[in-house]
Image (tube, helix red, strand yellow):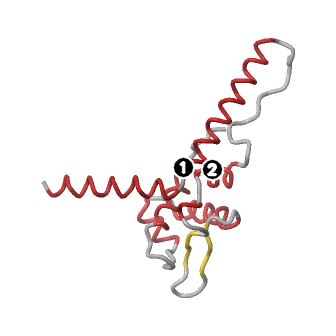
Amino acid sequence: MALFTSKVDYALRALLDLAAQPPGRPAQSREIAARQDIPESYLNQLLVVLRRAGLIRSVRGASGGYVLGREPRLLTAHDVVRALHGEDFLGELPTGAETAPAAWVVRSFHGRLSETVAQSLAETTLADLVVELQRLDEAQSLMLGL
């Protein structure tokens, strides 16, 4: 299974969109889909998963929509990947000749890789990605002003 699927890409983009909203202002899925160029039906499926995981909340009513379920600094990329793919996001190694030295080495490498990826995901918050997005927006604004 690929780690960085279209699900993760679209979910992170939707969360960044929600983080850009004024605090407490819900965004409707059709608005998010249009701004982020995400197919709305696919986005709606992802929003259900993110809501069930507690990463977002739905707000009912005429001006309802979705808001973040917690502050961006408390929402990690690991939370998103885990919500969409579960804990075993790198995939399990096949069982077999466990006594072969090469199998032990491969399993050890898989363990180290899993730890490294999980640590990087856990250390990256939505707030970190918001800062990157703001820097990009500022750089583009400067480029347009030239």
Q: Earlier in the sequence, mark 1 or mark 2?
A: 2
Quadrant position of residue 41 = bottom right
Image quarter (top left, top right, bottom left or bottom right) of the C terminus: bottom left
Q: Position of residue 40 (x, y in %)?
A: 52, 64
Q: Which residue, given by chain and number where applicable, does mark 2 sit on?
A: 78
Quadrant position of residue 70 = bottom right
146 and 48: which one is in front? 146
Q: Position of residue 120 (x, y in %)?
A: 58, 42
Q: In the image, what residue type sits under mark 1?
A: Thr
Q: Residues within 10 Å of mark 2 (few under 14, many from 20)?
A: many
Q: In the image, what residue type sits under mark 2?
A: His
Residue 58 is left or right of residue 21, and the answer is: right
Name the element at disc 1: loop
Image quarter (top left, top right, bottom left or bottom right) of the N terminus: top right
Residue 97 is left or right of residue 80, and the answer is: right
Tell me, yes or no, whether the two marked residues, 1 and 2, touch with CB atoms within 8 Å: yes
Q: Which residue, given by chain and number where applicable, does mark 1 sit on?
A: 124
Q: CA distance from mark 1 to mark 2?
A: 8 Å
Residue drawn where x is 44% and y is 72% of the image: 21
Compared with 88, 104 (above or below) is: above
Q: Residue furthest left?
A: 146
Residue drawn where x is 66% and y is 53% of the image: 84
Q: Nearer the viewer, mark 1 or mark 2?
A: 1
Quadrant position of residue 89 = top right
Name the element at disc 2: helix
Q: Position of residue 127 (x, y in %)?
A: 49, 58
